[in-house]
Amino acid sequence: MAENSLMKSISLLGTGLLGSAVVRRLLARGYQVTVWNRTQSKLDALLHEGARAAKTPREAVEASEAVLLFLADASAIHETLLLGDAPGALPGKTIIQMGTIGPDESVELQKDFRHAGAEYFEAPVLGSIPQALEGSLFVLVGGTAEQLEKWRPLFADAGQPPLHAGPIGKAAALKLALNHLIGTLTSAFAASLALVLKSGVDVGLFMQVLRKSALYAPTFDKKLDKMLSGDFSNPTFPAQHLKKDMDLFVRAARDAGVDPGLALEVSRVLGLAIDQGLALCDYAALSRVIGGETTAS
């Protein structure tokens, strides 16, 4: 089979919100996608759209030359592919880690997969469900230039032209640096919005000034309605996932000699939100902790 044909057959493990959106994008681009998820019922919608189900991780690995990983964390990757009978299918395969894990974890996974006979590199993405569906994700590659070039057509179909961050671990660090801003910017906006509301200042005036200033970030408008309404359903990025990423940033920052204070505080706030039953809600739910009930009248 020609290399281009091989690349049109892809396996993907972890069909959460982002993983499912990437599957739909690849199906729309003509890929044959084999999917596996720990909870098999979560595959039903994707099967109706043309994906193929694997009953086990090993079956998913055997179905394609490359396996894309959107699993929860490094521990889930290890348990899914490096334990049980899955390692027997790894020799000669390419494992592409596309979720958010620590740089040190990615380096260790490279060693583990290499020992199992598989090629490994990282390609975490920046963006969420809308960007995945429209193919505008930022794909950040940590690996060799040769790996990037070989798989460039796949990344181009999944998102914007891929960006090479350097060797294994560099893309993971870059992704954590960016996700740190998701937490800290959103927390800062939530606190400012809460003060505006509780001081009786017009929200429209606040946003008018903010949008015209150097302080503005588009994410503020994306989360404004959720924070005002208190409706955190239909998440693009659940609060529990952002907390996991903030905790990963804390560890990576400490390893690099960087003060992780801001990330620690955001993690604390997210932990309180999770304690309030908001774990699976949109991460904008952190505003419930920062400002209390700030719903505009």
Image (spheres, rainbow, N blue to C red):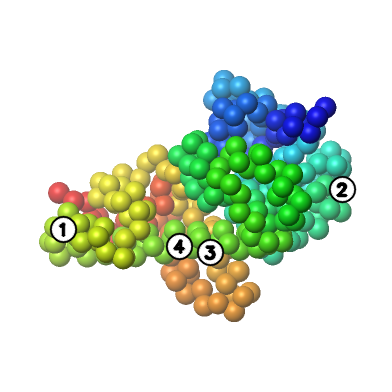
Looking at the image, how many numbered discs can be counted on the residues? 4
Tell which circle, 3 or 1, labels the residue nearer the N-terminal end. 3
Q: Which residue is mark 4?
A: 181
- Determine the CA span between mark 1 and mark 4: 25 Å
Based on the displayed image, in which of its 4 quarters is residue 193 positioned?
Answer: bottom left
Amino acid type of the residue that numbered disc 2 sits on in the rendered structure: Gly
Image position of 165 (left or right of 87): left
Q: Which mark is residue 177?
A: 3
Q: Position of residue 77 (x, y in %)?
A: 70, 49
Q: Residue at x 81, y 58 (%)?
A: 111
Q: Secondary structure at mark 2?
A: loop
- Determine the CA span between mark 3 and mark 4: 7 Å
Q: Position of residue 63 (x, y in %)?
A: 77, 30
Q: Secondary structure at mark 3?
A: helix
Q: Which residue is mark 1?
A: 205
Contact check, label 3 and label 4, Cβ < 8 Å: yes
Q: Is residue 52 something that shows in the picture?
A: yes
Q: Residue at x 70, y 35 (%)?
A: 11
Q: Which residue is mark 2?
A: 117
